[in-house]
Amino acid sequence: MKEFFNVETIEAVLAQVADFPVVDTEEIPLAECLGRVLAEEIASDVDIPDFNRSTMDGFAVRASSTFGASEANPAYLAVKGQISMGVRPDMTIGPGEVARIATGGMLPEGADSVIMVEHTDILDDTTIEAYRSVAPGQNTIEKGEDILKSEPALPRGRRIRPQEAGLIAACGRTMVTVFRRPMVGIISTGDEVVPVTQAPGQGQIRDINSHSLSGQVLEAGGVPVTFGIVKDSRDDLMERCQRALQTTDMVLISGGSSVGARDFTVEVLDALPDTGILVHGISISPGKPTILARSGHKPFWGLPGHAVSAMVVFAVVVRPFLDRLCGLSQATKKFPVQAVLNRNLASAQGRVDYVRVRLFESDGTVMADPILGKSGLIHTMVKADGLIAIGMNTEGLYQGSVVEVIPL
Ligand SMILES: Nc1nc2c(c(=O)[nH]1)N[C@H]1C(S)=C(S)[C@@H](COP(=O)(O)OP(=O)(O)OC[C@H]3O[C@@H](n4cnc5c(N)ncnc54)[C@H](O)[C@@H]3O)O[C@H]1N2
Ligand code: MOO
């Protein structure tokens, strides 16, 4: 008889993430870095900004020259000149003096603030009256207020979003060292599974998993590499697994993870050189028959064949491993969205149930509406905005409970 599952908790499985090494690094142009993960700490070669800078159109002034100014009692200030953009001003502002300045202009020596043009009246070329006071630092950005040259601007392990790309540009970096995108091999299995291009005959189903899993890999920052569909043959599966292992950093097989007569995944993984099975069975639903093996230093997954199960297992179990391979640091973890459950939800004890939910808004509250349906129904994933986890020792959740939704 085949070995049955030796079920482990999801926490025990996720505790193994750090046992797998991060992929190596490469240097790429700034223009190509979006979505990539920094493999170096970024620091600026200058303070940003490198000078005290106005954030308003108006007059650079010593704040003390405006103290007590009001509509009824304006301060009369002498205009010393105009500050040109992009150059260091060659004037010094003394008490009772101002210089015309535009947004982004460099504050001259002696000025510590800017009074907005709309809070002044220009009397003539050399005099204005200011009818509001300003505080020191008001309407300015101080030298180094954005980024200090002496301090790290971005940590290693951070995913580069548009704002990080902007900051890297501000730091003057045209090339960036990032982690290589991990290559993820994807193999579908099953005599009944046919390619998308083929009309399914009686008893057949088109290959969903290669495509949904490829999408999840791409979204996570990996490079999906599909290795087609393997019929239920031990030798074919062995050959395809070896091929996938040669060129990728992690492999996903879907189907054949269970304990049926044709489920060869465990057998093949057991027989692969330098490979050991770490997990066969996780106390989650869907996804109980998931397999994790280590082949050399690479994670090798056997995912359940059901389309929803494969995707849910990817989202909650595989993804943290792929994030690790990508070089993402734990600190960049995204937080779930909170929502209110719109109905009672039963759940079995002894496993974590991942329930698909649709989100909608009602009277300003984000509500979670469970989508019930078997784990072989891909349309239920299409309806879903996220997953909620119902814990091991929870029999269910009441309508009105606040739940945390893992976005899909
Ligand atoms: N006796 C038991 N049987 C099963 C158990 C169990 O605990 N004891 N677990 C069930 C659960 S839960 C799941 S999930 C499945 C997992 O089965 P496998 O991983 O072995 O997957 P298959 O049997 O190959 O396929 C299951 C299902 O999914 C369809 N499939 C497979 N690949 C694809 C694909 N690429 N695209 C679309 N659909 C796919 C396949 O046709 C099957 O209908 O085991 C249960 N059985
Ligand atoms: O646990 Mo299975 O993975 O329900 O679909």
Image (spheres, rainbow, N blue to C red):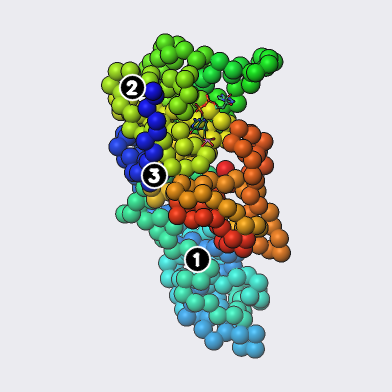
Of 291 and 140, the residue lying toward us:
291
Residue 65 appears in the figure: yes
Total marks placed = 3
Quarter location, residue 367: bottom right
Spatial CA distance of label 2 from label 1 is: 66 Å
Q: Nearer the viewer, mark 1 or mark 3?
A: 3
Looking at the image, residue 389 sits to the left or right of residue 332; the answer is: right
Q: Nearer the viewer, mark 2 or mark 1?
A: 2
| Numbered circle sitting on residue 9 | 3
Q: Which residue is mark 1?
A: 140
Looking at the image, residue 211 sits to the left or right of residue 244; the answer is: right
Image point (54%, 50%), residue name: 347
- Residue 98 lies, in percent from the top left, at 53, 72
Of 377 and 250, the residue lying toward us:
377
Image point (68%, 16%), residue name: 202
| Amino acid at circle 2 | Asp
Earlier residue among tags 1 and 3: 3
